[in-house]
Image (spheres, grey):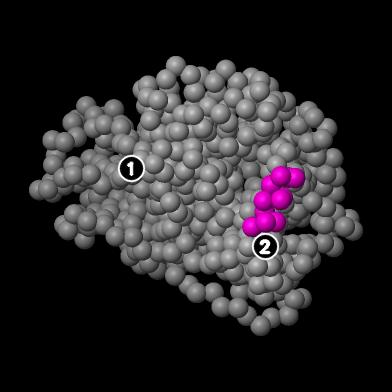
Amino acid sequence: MSGIKGLIYKKADLLSKQHSEEMNLKIIHPKHDEHRIFVEEKEKHTYPVHLEEQSKVLTFDGRIYNYSSLRKKLENEGYRFKNKSDTELILYLYQEYGNQCFKMLDGMFAIALYDKSNDKVFIARDFFGNKSLYYTQTQNGFVWSLELKEIISTLSQKPKIDKIGLNLYFQLTYIPAPFTIYEGVKKLEANSLLIYDLKADTYYIEPIHTDKVQKQNIDFYSAKKKVKDLVTESVLAMSVSDVPLGTFLSGGVDSSIVSLCLAQNTDQKINTFSIGFDKKSFDETEKSRMVAQLIGSEHNEFVISQKDLTQHLDAILLNFDQPFADSSALPSYMVAKKTSDFVKVALTGDGGDEVFGGYNKYRIGAINHKYTSIVPQFFHNSIVNISNVFTKQREDHRGLKFKIRKALQSINYDGEFFYNIIKLGFPEHELDRYMLSSYFTENPLKYYKSQLPKPQSLSDFRQVDKMLSLEGDMIVKVDRTSMLASLECRAPLLTHALWNYTHSLPDHFLLKGNDKKIIFKKAFEDQFPEGFLEKSKQGFGVPVGDWLKQGLKDELLSYIEDGFLEKQNIFNVAEIKRIVLNHVQSKEDNSFRLWTFYCFQKWYKNIYDL
């Protein structure tokens, strides 16, 4: 992972020379009376890059996809480039356009820029939040970094656990920005610019893009053509690379279309990569093989086993810096690790469901309003109670019984259905039973609900996903696992242009009845065998429930034995012990609640001494 971290210390002697050298920091603002600024200096890299006399200094991580057009624009303004780095481009853009330059960038990025002329530091995160940025302000100064552990290393003591972050994690299984697991440490939200004023010793945050998307009156054929053009343009822009490049090919709609676009617009055979599970019920390599044959790619298949996943478990989970319980991170790492033996950049199909309306929860959300207007609430409560008896068999997110139970429990008469259905951990009405009152917080989603209250439309649902699960789960998962595997992943379907365009279309162009991602499929259906894009992809079901009763059983039990929970003083000991013992004894299935608990304890034990 490329480095980007910095510190603004109010007094020079607060950061010793030895400490700054250990953290690989270079002072860039040595003579200010009240502040000193340090940024990371990496050997054999161009970080930090600065203009003459360090009047402007920039550190950067990511990739700018519209580099060529922006460079040409600057060259027409008289700028002369010394190299082909994105960093130099951004510096010149800032020199010319000030902080409006961040609106011009199409890409994935985390940027920190110090401008000596106005004594301000600008810290920016891209539209979707492909690159994370954390920060904290203490009485000694201000610190920012790509990684939480770098923030913590600068503090005099480890911070306390943040109650909102903790409750978000146990309900969602991840922690979305702006919260983190640490009290006083924040994560910069996607599409945000933080401006720190050294003279005033304060900061404020503003959105980078503020455009309001209006629904347009357009015919389906024209919209379909535009979608095809935008997707193709994005694939081509992200395929520019000076190292070997390929695509992930799962056999699903999104990765198949991305791979097709790349294959059709390059002279050489492209490399495609897929993984299968050694259990036939989870193996879908046949679909990816079919697409690979269709597009004529050099296809590589990797078959993985449970042993492959579990032997990398510790490294993967602890790589997230804070609790993270999306079990699909395990196969995500495996495909990245195997792929990195062949190429160093991979295009993915990530974001297709959010951009084009592909989730079942969108379809269910569309009928919530109709349901609540017809079915009285007291009658609905009876339906939920009955369904709980007949559907509580296994906590399998892909199983029909789980989906029925989850949908019925999420129905809400106050317009909050979508905020309920995205909770994949402990339901809020149960969590107060498992967590001590000193840590339990009611309505931890309050901040997000204030941003988008009572989501009702498909556009609303997708905006909530962008704010929560896309930023806090999917993007984090892919970024952290791919970087751990020394692979750069790029998502052509996650562009600002595509996002805005699909939001300008009538909802029924994307979702109607049982049909999802309609316009996306129609734009490319003539390139595939009839009906191929209508086949649903099963995905990998990581058997975490079985692991917790078998190979991980002893470790799970260690978290409820020898006074561990009592010393930790976060949970209701009796209730946690009950669900753990009932699960390992196969009396009930608590797979996903206990996986959330297990991942938290693994992180906690690694950070705090007990």
Q: Is residue 82 visible?
A: no
Left or right: 153, with 415 as reference point: left
**Sequence-first disc among 2 and 1:** 1
Which residue extends farthest bottom? 217
The amino acid beneath tag 1 is Glu
Answer with the quarter of the image where residue 338 lies.
Answer: top right
Q: Position of residue 533 (x, y in %)?
A: 81, 56
The residue under the point 18% across, 44% down is 139
Report the magenta stretch's main SS. Answer: helix
Q: Is residue 241 magenta?
A: no
Q: Is residue 228 above or below residue 410?
A: below
Q: Quadrant of the C terminus?
A: top left
Q: Nearer the viewer, residue 577 or 564?
A: 577
Q: Nearer the viewer, residue 362 or 575?
A: 575
| Residue designated by label 2 | 379
Q: Nearer the viewer, residue 493 or 538?
A: 538
Which class describes the residues within 10 Å of circle 1: few (<14), some (14-19), or many (20+)? some
Q: Is residue 394 visible?
A: yes
Q: Nearer the viewer, residue 483 or 176?
A: 176
Which residue extends farthest left? 33
Q: Position of residue 587 (x, y in %)?
A: 68, 28
Q: Is residue 385 magenta?
A: yes
> Range of the magenta residues?
381-391
The amino acid beneath tag 2 is Phe
Q: Which mark is residue 183?
A: 1
* Secondary structure at numbered mark 1: loop
